[in-house]
Image: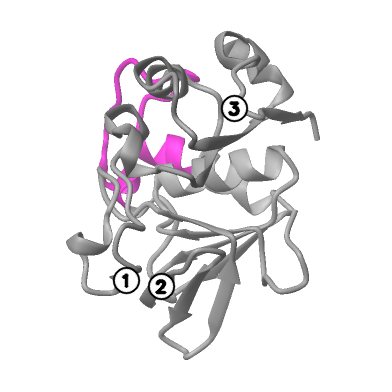
């Protein structure tokens, strides 16, 4: 997906379960990613002694974390930058640029900021900057003019896509939905929507 002017297809900031899931989903559709985490992957999960009702039957945080970490480390399309943190993230119309604490700069057409329980906007963190108007609320809460005329990458097919399109049937926002073949059933309701040029890969 990435052209020569980008270092990778996707920059992921944060190596918790959400960041790891983003990297794994991206790899499943053939996207290269760089995941940046200042500590260890899934570090907070290692502090949870017992889990209930978790998919896969995991009963402790370390058990679940170990499984996530092992799977991600075997994901060839994901490059890990552990022990590093991002000092700035700048979004332009055609790219995002992440600067690491080493001074290294990485560029990609897309970025995922997974540093907490909710998505961060430029107004939420001093190290994230973007031109005025280049922000977006979570897709399921977004208004039509939040993303007017823009193309948004959505990793995985799920209900927020349909929620957004049903709420704004005349939107000119274009959704690029990247999902593995196993998730095809999740996007059936929006497959024919002209705003959603969904693509599937079963790598």
Helix, strand or loop at mark 3: loop
Q: Relative to the observer, which residue lies in front, 113 or 195?
A: 195
Mark 3 against mark 2, which lies toward the viewer? 3
Q: Residues within 10 Å of mark 3 (few under 14, many from 20)?
A: many
Residue 163 lies in quadrant = top left
Residue 119 visible in image: yes
User: Are the two marked residues, 3 and 2, in contact with CB atoms closer than 8 angstroms?
Assistant: no
* Magenta segment includes 62: yes
Query: Who comes first in sequence, dot 3 or dot 2?
Result: 2
Give the Cα distance between marks 1 and 3: 27 Å
Give the magenta range.
Answer: 44-66
Q: Is residue 11 left or right of residue 129?
A: right
What residue is shown at x 66% (from left), y 28% (from top)?
198
Q: Which residue is mark 1?
A: 129
Marks 1/3 in contact by CB < 8 Å: the verdict is: no
- For label 2, the crowd category at 10 Å Cα-Cα, with few meaning under 14, some 14 to 19 and many 20 or more, is some
Point 59% across, 60% down: residue: 109
Between 156 and 160, which is closer to the camera in this rendering? 160
Q: Closer to us: mark 1 or mark 3?
A: 3
Q: Are marks 2 and 1 in contact (CB under 8 Å)?
A: yes
Q: Nearer the viewer, residue 80 or 200?
A: 200
Residue labelled with disc 3 = 196
Marks 3 and 2 sit apart, C-alpha to C-alpha, by: 26 Å
Question: Rounded to the nearest whole Å, what is the CA distance between mark 2 and mark 1?
Answer: 5 Å
Q: Mark 1: which secondary structure?
A: strand
Where residue 16 sits: x, y (%)?
39, 50
Which residue is labeled 2 in the image? Answer: 90
Which quadrant would the C terminus be assigned to in this image?
A: top right
- Residue 71 in sight: no
What is the number of callouts on the image?
3
Of labels 1 and 3, earlier in sequence is 1
């Amino acid at each position: 997906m990435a052209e020569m002017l980008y270092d990778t297809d996707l920059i992921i900031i944060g190596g918790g379960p959400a960041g790891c899931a983003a990297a794994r989903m991206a790899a499943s559709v053939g996207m290269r990613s760089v995941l940046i985490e200042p500590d260890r992957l899934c570090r907070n999960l290692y502090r949870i002694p017992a889990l209930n009702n978790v998919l896969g039957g995991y009963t402790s945080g370390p058990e679940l974390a170990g499984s996530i970490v092992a799977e991600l480390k075997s994901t060839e399309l994901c490059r890990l930058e552990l022990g590093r943190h991002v000092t700035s993230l700048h979004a332009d119309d055609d790219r995002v640029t992440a600067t690491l604490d080493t001074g290294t700069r990485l560029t990609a057409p897309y970025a995922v900021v997974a540093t907490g329980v909710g998505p961060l906007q430029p107004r939420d963190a001093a190290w994230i900057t973007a031109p005025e108007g280049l922000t977006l609320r979570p897709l399921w809460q977004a208004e039509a003019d939040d993303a007017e005329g823009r193309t948004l990458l959505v990793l995985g097919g799920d209900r927020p896509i349909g929620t957004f399109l049903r709420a704004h049937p005349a939107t000119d926002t274009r959704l690029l939905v990247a999902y593995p073949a196993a998730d095809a059933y999740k996007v059936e309701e929006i497959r024919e929507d002209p705003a959603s040029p969904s693509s599937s890969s079963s790598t």
